[in-house]
């Protein structure tokens, strides 16, 4: 029979591993290459919809990406 202490230790260990995984995924999603891929995907959406609000949002994200990551993506012409 497994003691209560061992059960609690296993639960705490699993919770700790889950927390580490969540923090890792959140951190990875904030990297420059991931942000750039997200912007490029949204640029493709804009090409099909020509939604001016989406264009403004993408341009703001491009400016932020350029400043944070030191790249030089061109902003869209929202016309």
Image (cartoon, helix red, strand yellow):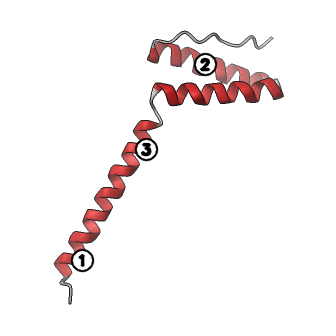
Q: Is residue 8 left or right of residue 36?
A: left
Q: Is residue 38 left or right of residue 68?
A: right
Q: Tell me the residue at 20%/85% (across/down).
A: 2
Q: CA distance from mark 2 to mark 3?
A: 24 Å
Along the polypeptide, which appears first: circle 1 or circle 2? 1
Say which element carries label 2.
helix
Name the outermost residue toward the bottom. Answer: 1
Q: Is residue 53 left or right of residue 71?
A: right
Question: 52 or 77: which is nearer to us?
Answer: 77
Among the 4 quarters of the image, the one containing residue 9: bottom left
Q: Tell me the residue at 61%/18% (across/down).
A: 60
Residue 32, position as x, y percentages in the image: 47, 25
Say which element carries label 1.
helix
Q: Tell me the residue at 26%/65% (across/down).
A: 12
Along the polypeptide, which appears first: circle 2 or circle 3? 3
Q: CA distance from mark 1 to mark 2?
A: 50 Å
Determine which residue is flagged by label 1.
7
The circle on residue 60 is 2
Q: Are marks 2 and 3 in contact (CB under 8 Å)?
A: no
Along the polypeptide, which appears first: circle 1 or circle 3? 1
Determine which residue is flagged by label 3.
25
Q: Quadrant of the N terminus?
A: bottom left
């Amino acid at each position: 029979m497994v003691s209560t202490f061992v059960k609690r230790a296993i639960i705490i260990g699993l919770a700790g591993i889950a927390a580490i995984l969540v923090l890792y995924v959140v951190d990875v999603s904030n990297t420059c290459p991931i942000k750039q891929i997200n912007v490029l995907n949204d640029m493709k959406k804009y090409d099909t919809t020509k939604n001016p609000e989406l264009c403004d949002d993408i341009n703001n994200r491009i400016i932020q990406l350029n400043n944070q990551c030191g790249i030089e993506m061109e902003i869209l012409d929202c016309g």
